[in-house]
Image (cartoon, rainbow, N blue to C red):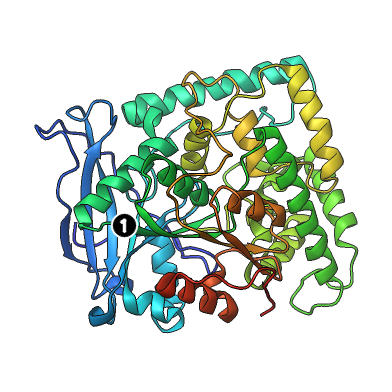
Amino acid sequence: MSGLSRRGRRAGVVVLAAGVILSPVFTAPAQAQARTIEWRACTDAEFIGMQCGTMRVPVEWAKPRGAQVDLALVRRPASDPARRQGTLLLNNGAGRSAVEQLRFAMRSGFPELAGAMAQRFDIVAIDPRGVGHSAPVRCAVPIKPEGVTHFPKDRAAFSRLAEHNRAFAQDCLRRNGPLVANVDATSTARDFEALRVNLGERQLNWYGIMHSTLLGRTYATLFPGRLRTLNADTALDDTGSPLDQALGEASAAEDSFNRFAAWCTTDDKCALKGRDVGVEYDALVARADREPIPVEAGRKMTGEDIREATQDYLNLAAFTWPRLAEAIVKAQGGDASGFATTPDRTLDPVQAQVSGCLDTPRQIRTFKQAERARQALRARSPHLGGAVSGWANLIGCVGWPVGGKAVRAGGEIPDAPRALVVQSTHQAHAPHAAGQAFAEQFRGSLVLGREGDDYSMILSSRCVREATNRYLTDLVLPAPGTVCAD
């Protein structure tokens, strides 16, 4: 593979660009370990001068001689090879392509902005198994079709949801084979250890965003001493129950929505400037629940659909907040297309849901449990109703025929690096307190606060870049209590 093609849709101006569609590749080689990476010159415009590669690993690490899957990589060599310090592994969130994260970064002037990170480290982006360019999981049955709700109000609706979730999983299994049951964090972490060996590195440097901060912790747990640094951008906290995590996320998303609404009262970039955004949003949701709003080709969106699409629009204030306001105005006019696709152009919701169902413990099994959770979420999140990704991972896995493979969280990880955790003071997917809970699992770690609502902060904050580069090059953490205000 000499290049990485993109989907035939326009790339987004937010976190990441568009992904691609590749079919799963399964073979049965004689070797019982990952094969040597096959590197070639990349041909995509954004990756000129870089190397594109594939690495073949077992679908099931317990059966190393069984079916295999090809993982896609892009490597940007250190621009100052004489001072090279190692490899920095770039990771993105659940169901999100790291290769496309790198593409967006290159379009945003990453080499010039990054400083020592790009000068002294090879940057390697690898799409996890089943995601993006690495044998992406594709399913024909929708995650949530018409007539199915993630917030069932009676036992019949709960049963329909469970039956649909089961049908969705079975369709995914039919179309993708055993890979669907093996896109869990532990299997993915083993892939990254195979990558380390293939690269010939004694240790890796880890740059993870959101869910991949947890993946980094899994790697550190399974392979002690193999991480030199761990930079966690917008860390998640899974040390409590999945419902606790969803409730915390719902509170964070509601806070972000309220900040968005307040911004709209005075900012000219908001299409709803001067209006009561909370009231108008609630009215739109209620209207769409009574009479779903058209999108295209007969498809319509309910109020629940609009709520579920809102969280990702709250992630980057400068980029996505204006687009959220425009989507609301457009939907008020009878066109809900602004909520029909995610603004994160490398996120594949199907791939995120499949891996989420493997990594999330099954806490919701009965209608009574779901009803109690629904009421708790609504109390935390009046505008959004608790429609956040953490809840989708819980309720969207009810009835799944494939058992979960959740990684045990909490407790200090031995022989792990001091982590630099960069956490916004307001972020729709992760409460600020989640950063501290993550840091406590790595002795001597520190949370660097960043005032605002964003994630992927290396591109937007000079203060964050300087702290990150000092950590990467000299292993020095900022002073406790530091908060970046730029």
Q: To which residue does mark 1 refer?
A: 203
Q: Residue at x 74, y 52 (%)?
A: 253
166 in relation to 108, above or below: above
Of residues 235 and 339, which is closer to you in this image? Answer: 235
- Numbered disc 1: secondary structure: loop
Regarding residue 302, the answer to whether it shows in the image is no
Q: Is residue 129 placed above or below 113 in the rendered structure? A: above
Residue 215 showing in the rendered view:
yes
| Farthest residue, direction left | 30
* Rendered position, 3 above or below 352: below
- Which quadrant would the N terminus be assigned to in this image? bottom left
Q: Position of residue 41 (x, y in %)?
A: 18, 68
Classify residue 76 as left or right of residue 352: left
Q: Residues within 10 Å of mark 1 (few under 14, many from 20)?
A: some
Residue under the point 53% across and 64% down: 15
Q: Residue at x 73, y 62 (%)?
A: 426
Task: Tell me which corner region of the image, top left, top right, bottom left or bottom right, holds residue 275.
Answer: bottom right
Rendered location of residue 37, percent (x, y): 17, 53
Q: Nearer the viewer, residue 188 or 402?
A: 188
Q: Quadrant of residue 386?
A: top right
Give x and y (percent) for residue 289: 79, 39
Could you tell whether 264 is left or right of 87 in the image?
right
* Pick the front one: 176 or 328: 176
Residue 412 position in % (x across, y down): 54, 44
For this view, does 168 lie left or right of residue 256?
A: left
Amino acid type at mark 1: Gln
Q: Nearer the viewer, residue 435 or 129?
A: 435
Quarter of the C terminus within the rendering = bottom right
Q: Residue at x 82, y 70 (%)?
A: 264
